[in-house]
Amino acid sequence: MKNAPTALTDDDLDQLDALLTELSERSEMVPDLEQLDGFLAALACGPRQLPLDQALQALGEPLPFADAAQAAEVLALIERRWQGVLQAIDAPVQRLDDDRALQPLLTDWEAVIEHTPVEERAAFGEVPALGAVWASGFLQAVDAFEDEWLLAADDPGNEFVDGCLQTFEVLASDEDELAPEQREMSRDERLADALWAVYDLRDFWRERASLRPVKQVRKQPEPGRNDPCPCGSGKKYKKCHGGGDDGGQAA
């Protein structure tokens, strides 16, 4: 039996972050680690789980690997993170501080700047707020697979899905783009809303999948006992393949 991929260690995450940074120097389409993690979260709780290699094509263009060895290393690390995200989203958590709950890979840029010497802080420029890049990655995946996320205009589930996605839009938005009541929420509260939305969307799409009608296989009507046997023998059905439970010809 094939062993499940192990969770990424801090060293693994640093390595993946460095590799993505290197790839981003060859193409601006390459996501950073936080954006990729949001992208994976949307794939995991969405309408249909695609094979990872197929889903990554929705990033816009093939990742610009230097060679086959680098491709294998990057994809192996992403696969391990993907399995960790799936496991966390499958977990029956009741609290976000549950060790089994999804722990998004976020960069707290305000904390980074705070621990940076004052004379070097100007080099950072404007930095994203906590969780904004992760939420943007999530919404990128939703946009990439819009046809699957899009419900019919009269579908009663629209309001629920839109409400869940709005939590990510709030988390990804600048403060001046938010409504007054949204600005009153702390970043931690906005992040918690988005994380619960991941689990709500998981439950929503799984329930929808369970309610999809099963395609029935229609059995072809059997001929009457006195009709010619469809095998072409020229005998009546009751004297041929309709003559016994074993389906064989009658004597």
Image (cartoon, rainbow, N blue to C red):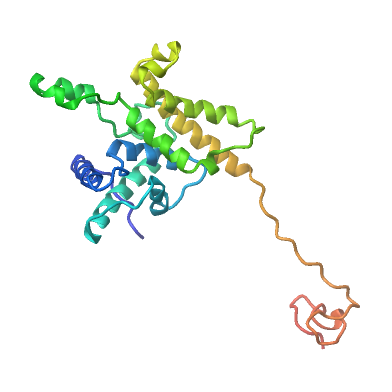
> Is residue 170 toward the left or the right of residue 203 in the image?
left
Where residue 16 sits, quadrant-wise, is top left
Above or below residue 154? Residue 115 is above
| Circle count | 0
> Is residue 61 toward the left or the right of residue 77 in the image?
right
* Residue that sits furthest to the right in the current view: 226
Res 91 seen here = no
Above or below residue 220? Residue 138 is above
> Is residue 139 toward the left or the right of residue 108 in the image?
right
Return the residue nearer the eye: 30 or 7: 30
Q: Residue at x 50, y 34 (%)?
A: 201
Residue 129 in percent (x, y) is at: 30, 23
> Is residue 34 toward the left or the right of residue 178 in the image?
left
Res 6 seen here = yes
Above or below residue 69? Residue 101 is above
Q: Residue at x 14, y 22 (%)?
A: 121
Specify the quadrant that holds the C terminus: bottom right
Specify the quadrant that holds the N terminus: bottom left
Q: Residue at x 31, y 48 (%)?
A: 78
Above or below residue 1? Residue 245 is below
Residue 76 in percent (x, y) is at: 28, 53
Residue 118 in percent (x, y) is at: 10, 19
Where residue 39 sits, quadrant-wise, is top left
Residue 115 in percent (x, y) is at: 13, 22
